Amino acid sequence: MPKPNFFIIGAPKCGTTSLIGYLANHRQVTISIPKEPHYFLTDLPGYRRIRNLDDYEACFSTADEQEQPARIGEASTWYLYSKEAVPNILDYNQDAKIIVMIRNPVDMAESLYKQFVYGLEEDAKTFEEAWKLQPERQAGRSIPKHIAEPIRLQYKDVCSLGSQLHRVSQIVPRDQLKVIVLDDFKSNTKKVYEEVLGFLGLPPDDTDSFPVLNQRKANRYPSINKLLLTNSVLDRLVALIKKVFGIEKLGLSQQLLKLNEKRETGSQLDGKLRRDLTKEFEQEITLLEEWLGRDLTHWRVH
């Protein structure tokens, strides 16, 4: 069974879906199905999608269908946050190539909050409320009903990218580690994509179109999303329809969820809250500057 040899390990809301989507179209690349198996996430067991090694390696079975699958990879975005995932990966494949994508931690925290709201994993009405709830939730209180691994709601820790990158860089050889800043990825996607191909030892291709994948989403009507994702009566109705009419895949709920989506744009952080959050993440931004050897002052000024 083919084994993966490169990993996009995060962070969430930093462009990983777009990058793995572009790489999936390269003739010498095989990507896991599903994209985020999170098999090596042993310290967040409630968020592991694949738990068995045979099942994990089966995620890459399409590599057998390619003539030259030089690179086989996956993109599980919580590996960077995890303290165990990267050591687990290196135990599995010591030569693995590791790709990290980062962004301004203030923007990441807000974007992550909105993603959780969309997926019903967050019930705080505003990001400011969610931020203030962190100590309460750390103590096991005010936990949303549908969150997988409540520790993921600790926005300060989850978005402490400087500390996470420093930890990873202590165990991953520099020539096996590629760090991408989302600002660069957005401003010159083709250049960054070609750098990634070089890092992975892949030949260039003729890709010129780089659509943004997994844009931030919100619900037009949150109550509809809640009904579709949590209503057991609806689940039973769909199961009955499938049984009566012999339909293997109805897809009704997914179609309705799609219709209920709207694109979420811009930031809702007011000036004072953004300044306060920037102070909270000052040390993390400094750590990133030191590691990257570049000035990130623009992350501090808004």
Image (cartoon, helix red, strand yellow):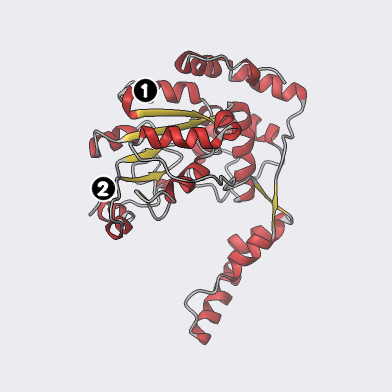
Q: Regarding mark 2 in the picture, which secondary structure is present there?
A: loop
Residue at 33% from the left image edge and 34% from the top image edge: 97
**In the image, what residue occupies the spot 47% across and 77% down?**
248
80 sits to left or right of 158: left
Name the disc covering residue 169, or none.
1
What residue is shown at x 30% (from left), y 24% (from top)? 173
For the view shown, which residue lies furthest in the bottom direction? 244
- Horizontal side of 84 relative to 18 (left or right) equals left
Residue 65 place in picture, x, y as percent: 30, 60
298 or 79: which is nearer to us? Answer: 298
- In-front residue for pair 231/256: 256
The answer to which quarter of the image holds residue 201 is top left
For disc 2, the neighbor class at 10 Å (few under 14, some 14 to 19, many from 20) is some
Q: CA distance from mark 1 to mark 2?
A: 23 Å
Q: Name the mark on residue 128.
A: none
Res. 124 in view: yes
Q: The disc labelled 1 sits on which kind of residue?
A: Ser
Q: Quadrant of the N terminus?
A: bottom left
Mark 1 vs 2, N-terminal side: 2
> Percent position (x, y) of residue 282?
58, 16
Q: Position of residue 141 (x, y in %)?
A: 57, 38
Whether residue 133 is visible, yes or no, is: no
**What amino acid type should be assigned to the residue bearing mark 2?**
Lys
Q: Is residue 20 left or right of residue 69?
A: right
Residue holding disc 2: 3
